[in-house]
Amino acid sequence: MTMTLVLGATGNVGRQVVVQLTERGLPVRALARRPEQANLPGGVEVVPGDLSDVDSLRAALRGVDSVFLMWPLISADPAQEIADTIAGSARRLVLLSSAAARSDSDDAISQVHRSVEKAIERTSLEWTFLQPHGFAANTLGWASQVREDGVVRGAYGPVYSTLIHEADMAAVAVTALTSDGHVGAKYDLTGAAALTQVEQVRVIGEVIGRQTRWEEVSREAARELLLERIPAKYADAMLDAFARLAGREPDRPTTTVEDVTGVPARTFAQWVADHAAEFGPAER
C-alpha cells in the first residue's frame, strides 16, 4: 500500500481526509507544526514541519506516493517551489482549491488559488483540483454570537451560497487519491442546496433547538466582525463577493459529490447536527 501525505491535516477538511484514509486501512503521514497537539487517529504518522519550511516538507515526502494539499498560506509566492518539491517525490496530488480560482475577479482569494493551481499544472504531478463554492464550516464564525444571544449580525443576508460539509470534500479527495480516472479534473463542489445567510441561521436554530435570527448590519460593521477572524484583504474579498451576488438567483447545486463518490452531498442541517456542540450554550 502506498503512503499518502496530508498537508493541512489538522484543518477541517484535512482531518477528515486523514480519518477516511485510515478507515480504509491505508497508511497516512501528516505534517503538523505541533505534532503533540495534532490529535489525529492512532496509527497516523505525524511528523513536524510546515509548508514555510521546504526542508521539513522534503523530509516528510520520503516514501510518499500521493499528497493531499490544503494551501494554508496568505501568499502564493512559494507555490512553485512547494509544487516542484512535491513533484520531486510524489506521483499524485489532490489540491483543495476554490471555485474562486475559476472567476474573473482579481480579489486576493481568487488570485492565491489561481496561482497555486497554475504552479501545480506546471509540474509532472497527476493532479486533481477540488473547487468548492463555500465551506459549511465557515459558519462556525457565527458560533459565539449564537451562544451569546442567538442573533447573528452580518451583511448581505439574502445572498445565497451552496455550503458543503468538510466530510464530503474529503470523500471526493480520498476517492481521487486512491482510484484512477481523476487526473486533470477540476471538481465543482457544492452542498445539497442553496441557502441564504438568513436561512442558514434559521437552520442552525432549528437543529440546535434555540431561537436564532439574522440581523442585517452595515458592510463596515460586518467587516469589523470579520477582522476578528481573518486578514483584511480576505474580509474585503468575501464582502466584495457577497456584493456581486446580491440580488442574483441561487446557483444550482452540482451533483459532483455523488458523481465521484456514489453518495449524495450532505445537507447543511446534517452539518449543523455534526457541530451542534460548538453552537451550544454561552459560557457563564
Image (spheres, helix red, strand yellow):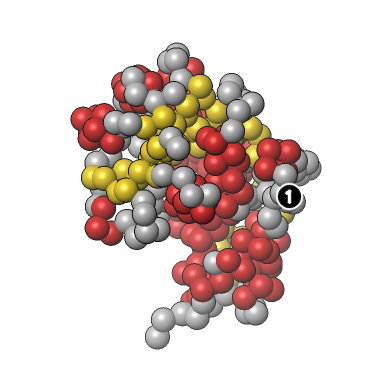
* Residue farthest front in this picture: 1
Expressed as whole percent of the image width and height from the top left, the position of residue 94 reads: 50, 32
Report whether residue 33 is seen. yes
| Residue at left offset 28%, top offset 36% | 60
| Residue at left offset 55%, top offset 28% | 128
Expressed as whole percent of the image width and height from the top left, the position of residue 130 reads: 57, 35
Q: Is residue 103 left or right of residue 259?
A: left
Expressed as whole percent of the image width and height from the top left, the position of residue 25 reads: 48, 49
Q: Residues within 10 Å of mark 1 (few under 14, many from 20)?
A: some
> Taking 159 as reference, is 58 above or below it?
above
Please name the residue that numbered disc 1 is placed on: 264
Q: Amino acid at mark 1?
A: Pro
Expressed as whole percent of the image width and height from the top left, the position of residue 187 reads: 63, 32
Q: Does dot 1 land on a helix, a strand or a loop?
A: loop
* Residue farthest bottom in this picture: 284
Q: Quadrant of the N terminus?
A: top left
- Residue nearer the viewer, 41 or 117: 41
- Residue nearer the viewer, 23 or 244: 23
Report whether residue 224 is seen. no
| Residue at left offset 44%, top offset 15% | 124
Q: Is residue 86 left or right of residue 253?
A: left
Where is residue 245, by image quadrant? top right
